[in-house]
Amino acid sequence: MRTPYLILFILISVLIAGCDTPSDSFERLNRNDPLSPAFKGGSVAGLTVYADTSGAITVKWGKLDETVAKNVLEKSLGDSLNFEKIAELEPDVRQYIDTTRDVRKDTYYRISSYLEMDEGVHKLYGSSQAKLEFGEISDTNYRFLDQDNRLELSWKTDVPLFTHFVISSENVITEEQEKSVKIQADGIDNRYVDPLLDIDFETRKYIITGIIEHSGTPQEEVADASISFSAVSNFQPENLEIEILNEQDWQISWENNAFFATEVEVTRTNTEGDIIFNLPPGTTSFVDSLIVDDSRDSYANRFRRYGIRFLTDTGSSLQVDDSDQVEIDQPVIAISNIKQNDPNSLTIYWAPFGNDKELIKEYIIEKSHVYNPDRFVEIARVKTDAPRQYTVTNVNEEEDPIYRVRTVTSYPSEPASFTYSHDYEMDYSFTTGMNYVTSMEVSSDKRYLAAVSFREELGNSILVTDIESEQPVSEITIPSQQISDIKISPDDSSIYFAVPTDEAIYKADFPSGNNIEKIIDNARVNLANVFHIDISPDELFLIGTGGQGFVKRWDLNSYDIDFIFADYNTPTFYLYKNIAISPDGSLIGGNNGSNYMMDSQNGTILEYVPSGSANTTDLQFSGGGNYFTFTSGFQSTSILSTESWEVTDWVEGGRRADFHPEDPVMVLAGRNSVFTYDLDTSAIGDIISDDNGSRAFARFENSIIHIDDDRIGTVGGGNSIQIWKKKGTQRRWKNVLR
């Protein structure tokens, strides 16, 4: 038990004995102690050297050991070997500013710290050195002093320690030095002006060298930078402008500072190509003239771009610059409104749009030619300081005038077509609950209307409405099946409908919808189910076709297949009606990207007209059978004569169409309006709108129907069916807005 206490006693004794030695004996043996003989030396931390924009050089270092007695700052010019003392500083000083500006490219500063061993005796504690970094030349630039044909070079330096700059130039093509000049430095912002006495070069490169030069020392290059100056590419036309003097003459003007140019080249670019005009040196304007062309499709005189460039002849070749171009941002003109003053007078209003509309000096009002609607003839001009409107007098009620407005520099506005139209009013509207109404039929007595949507889910219905009493009559549906197309029998006693999901054709009493009967099973044509049907006027046979495949004919007495029209299949775009029977029952018209006519009795191809559209939305015969039309979803309706099978007319703006039951008059649904069109006179009849301007509307997905002389059926907002009725006998001018 005594052993632990004995060991503790011995340790305490040794510790007490050690305390009897001098207090610094332990430190003197420590290599980290600056006063120890074993100390190997240290360094001064954080030494940095930099110059500011005034030229003063600042030397900084970090905090030193508390035993340091003094600091000695030294400087070496040109290398890091020959240091000379420039200052002796107190130990608590950690910064020194050198204002001598006696520097070289390689200038070093060294700080040395000393310990005081005995009075007057010092020992080096440690030292560090750092190089002065400077000499950047930046922001090189130039500008041409055109008042005396001189070039001013400019540049900046980071510090004002340079004494001089040497500017030398060389030809980039020949790489030969042309001249060299030495100038006095002027702080950090410096300039030099070259008189440019010899301008017959393409590109000159200036080399700027910053040097330091002191008395008794050799010149020393510290930094350099370059500026490349291309005479021809930098003397470009400025402030190009176009002034329209009249329809024919345009004046182009520019500022010309290329005193060295031997020629000025003007290039006019338009739809007919490029025309070059060579002008004398010093030219600053040019009047270009072009003959006015009144044709609708040629606007070469109205759309011009001009390029101006200066040419120099060096003797060996023609050196040119990149041309500077100017053109007018073509304004857009839009007819904004029309006001009827009396039956023979209209006022047209318009508005300009575009960045350069302030260049417009006058507006040109044009009217379509009576015998050639595609050709427009000027009827008036309106100055820009006058109201943007024009009143047309002596308007003929028997024609459909078309007006447009343009300027000298613009395309014409969209033509505004006008027709002397009756007003309509919405007589009746009812909600269908359908997404789209893809098929509508009206009974021959014009009392009942049937509608269906092929775009509905399974279990969709045929809606039958009494449009005289404005009451619903019946709703016909096949549970869990989809109805695609309908056709009312000629005597109004039955309604036939295709059910492609059941591969069948059904029949029901009309208008009650009673006694639903599947009359044709396995109603398929080639590989497709029947989607569209039509019935002969004597109700002896029915034809059907599908999304792909052929046309089939069924006998409506036996419901057996008569024969298959296998020569021409219908297109795959099966959402819209693409087959029809002529009013006398002798022809079947179809479209499979081209129009074709077949003999309904034997299937013989009678006519094949290679003009049509695979995007057909409506295909039908006129009530008298004189015309056959097909309407494209691309907003046009083509009209063919059944006598010659030639296209006799083409109506722009129709996306859906339907014939008057007896007359050669169609109702067409355009993007912005619904209107009637007389095929015999090739003229627009009525715009379907009321006296407040509310218009009938029709999407191309929805069907449209011409009920009788006074009523039109369309599908409006919310997919409600709207019955528009002619209001009185008075007419007024309306904008077609197709």
Image (cartoon, helix red, strand yellow):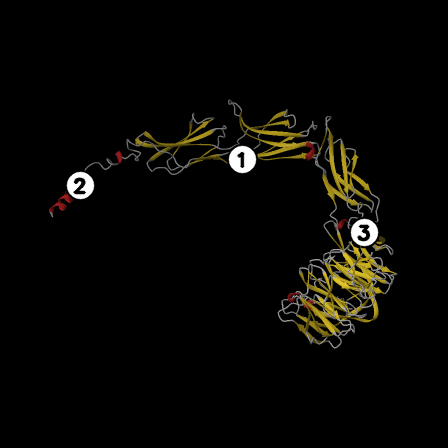
Specify the amino acid type for callout 3.
Answer: Glu
Is residue 144 among what the camera can see? yes
Mark 1 and mark 2 residues within 8 Å of each other at the beta carbon: no
Name which residue lies at 72% across and 26% down. Answer: 316
Provide the residue designation for mark 3: 362
Q: Secondary structure at mark 1?
A: loop
Task: Tell me which numbered mark, 3 or 2, is placed earlier along the sequence.
Answer: 2
Q: Secondary structure at mark 3?
A: strand
Is residue 738 among what the camera can see? no
Q: Secondary structure at mark 2?
A: helix
Provide the residue designation for mark 2: 16
The alpha-carbon separation of the residues under discs 1 and 2 comes to 66 Å
Horizontal placement of 253 versus 31: left or right? right
Specify the amino acid type for callout 2.
Answer: Ile
Mark 3 and mark 2 residues within 8 Å of each other at the beta carbon: no
Task: Tell me which numbered mark, 1 or 2, is placed earlier along the sequence.
Answer: 2
Quarter residue 607 falls in: bottom right
Which numbered circle lies on residue 78? none
Specify the amino acid type for callout 1.
Answer: Asp
Of badges 3 and 2, nearer the viewer stands: 3
Task: Tell me which numbered mark, 1 or 3, is placed earlier along the sequence.
Answer: 1
Provide the residue designation for mark 1: 158
Q: Nearer the viewer, residue 442 or 726?
A: 442
Disc 2 crowd rating (10 Å Cα; few below 14, some 14-19, many 20+) is: few
